[in-house]
Amino acid sequence: MSSKTRNLTLKVWRQKCGEKKGRLETYQANNISVDMSFLEMLDVVNEDLTKSRKEPIAFDHDCREGICGMCGAVVNGRAHGHEKDTTLCQLHMRHFSDGDTIVIEPWRSRAFPLIKDLIVDRSALDKIIAAGGYISVKTGGAPDANALPIARDVAETAFKAAACIGCGACVAACPNASAMLFVSAKISQLALLPQGRPEAAKRAQAMVHQMDECGFGNCSNETECEMECPKGISIVEIARLNREFFKAEFS
Ligand code: SF4
Ligand code: FES
C-alpha cells in the first residue's frame, strides 16, 4: 500500500425502502486514492458491487462541488463527516487513515423519510421554503447595485446566511431533529435586506409553523447544528429568527 492509497472497511446502511428493515453491511474499499472524494470512493465500491452483480449503494449527489446540497450522510456519527465546513462530496479520503473502519448512515429524522440506503426525502425543507412565500416589493428592472445603499456589514451577514445549501445536516446533527438553523438562514438572508423587511415577521411565523407541521423537533440550543453545518451558518441566525417570529406572534 502506498501512502497515496487507503484500504478501508465500510459499514454501510442498506435498506430497500422505508417499509423494510435496514441493516449495516460490510464492504472492503481497497486501494482508494487519497485524492478521491468520499463520493468517488463510494463510486469505486459501487463499481465492484455492480461487477459482482450486487445492488449498488444508493446515495444522493449532484454538483459534487459543495453547492447544490444534494449529498449527505452520517459518517462515523458526524453529518458530512468530521472535517469542518465540508460537504460529503468535498470530503477527501486523505482525511482517513489506512485500515480505518467507516460507518456510513443516512440522515435520521422523522421529517426525512428514508427512500433507499443513504437517500432520504428532504422535500420537507422545500415545503418550509414555499411557506415563506415571495417578497411583495416591486424591484422593477435591475438597478445599479449602489442605488440602494446597504451597509457593508449588513450585506455580508445576509450573504453569509444565503450560503445555506439546504442539505439538512443541521437536522441530522440535532438531537431533536430541529430544522431551526436552516429556517433561520432562510429568514436572515431576506430579513436583513430592505426588499425582505416588509414580510420578515410574517415569513418567520409561516415557516416555523410549517416546520412544526412537517414533524421537525424544537430547538433546545444544543448547538450541534452549527458544528456540522458545511456552510458555517451561525446559531446567531436562530436568535434573529426568534425575534421575527415573536414579533409576528404577539403583534
Ligand atoms: S443551515 Fe447548514 S446544515 Fe442546515 S441546511 Fe443549511 S447548509 Fe445545510
Ligand atoms: S453533491 Fe452538491 S453539495 Fe455535495
Image (cartoon, rainbow, N blue to C red):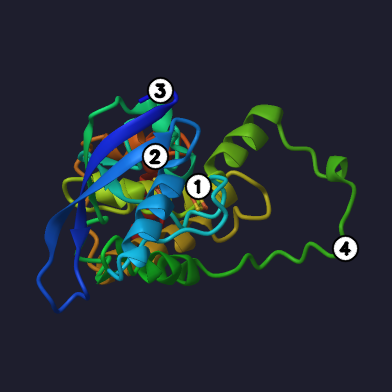
Q: Position of residue 98 (x, y in %)?
A: 29, 26
Q: Nearer the viewer, residue 170 or 18?
A: 18
Q: Nearer the viewer, mark 4 or mark 3?
A: 3
Residue occupied by mark 3: 2
| Residue type at the position of mark 3 | Ser
Residue 141's label in the rendered image is 4
Does ligand 1 reach within 8 Å of label 2's beta carbon? yes
Q: Are marks 3 and 1 in contact (CB under 8 Å)?
A: no
Q: CA distance from mark 2 to mark 3?
A: 33 Å
Residue 164's label in the rendered image is 1
Q: Position of residue 39 (x, y in %)?
A: 43, 49
Q: Quadrant of the C terminus?
A: bottom left
Q: Earlier in the sequence, mark 2 or mark 4?
A: 4
Q: Position of residue 50 (x, y in %)?
A: 36, 66
Q: CA distance from mark 3 to mark 1?
A: 38 Å
Q: CA distance from mark 1 to mark 2?
A: 9 Å
Q: CA distance from mark 4 to mark 3?
A: 58 Å
Assign a secondary structure to mark 3. loop
Mark 1 neighbour density, 10 Å: few (under 14) some (14–19) many (20 or more):
many
| Residue type at the position of mark 2 | Cys
Residue 83's label in the rendered image is none
Q: Are marks 1 and 2 in contact (CB under 8 Å)?
A: yes
Q: Earlier in the sequence, mark 1 or mark 4?
A: 4
Q: CA distance from mark 1 to mark 4?
A: 27 Å
Q: Earlier in the sequence, mark 2 or mark 3?
A: 3
Left/right placement of residue 162 relative to residue 54 reads right
> Is residue 142 visible from the viewing direction of this image?
yes
Q: Is residue 13 above or below residue 16?
A: above
Left/right placement of residue 60 relative to residue 24 reads right
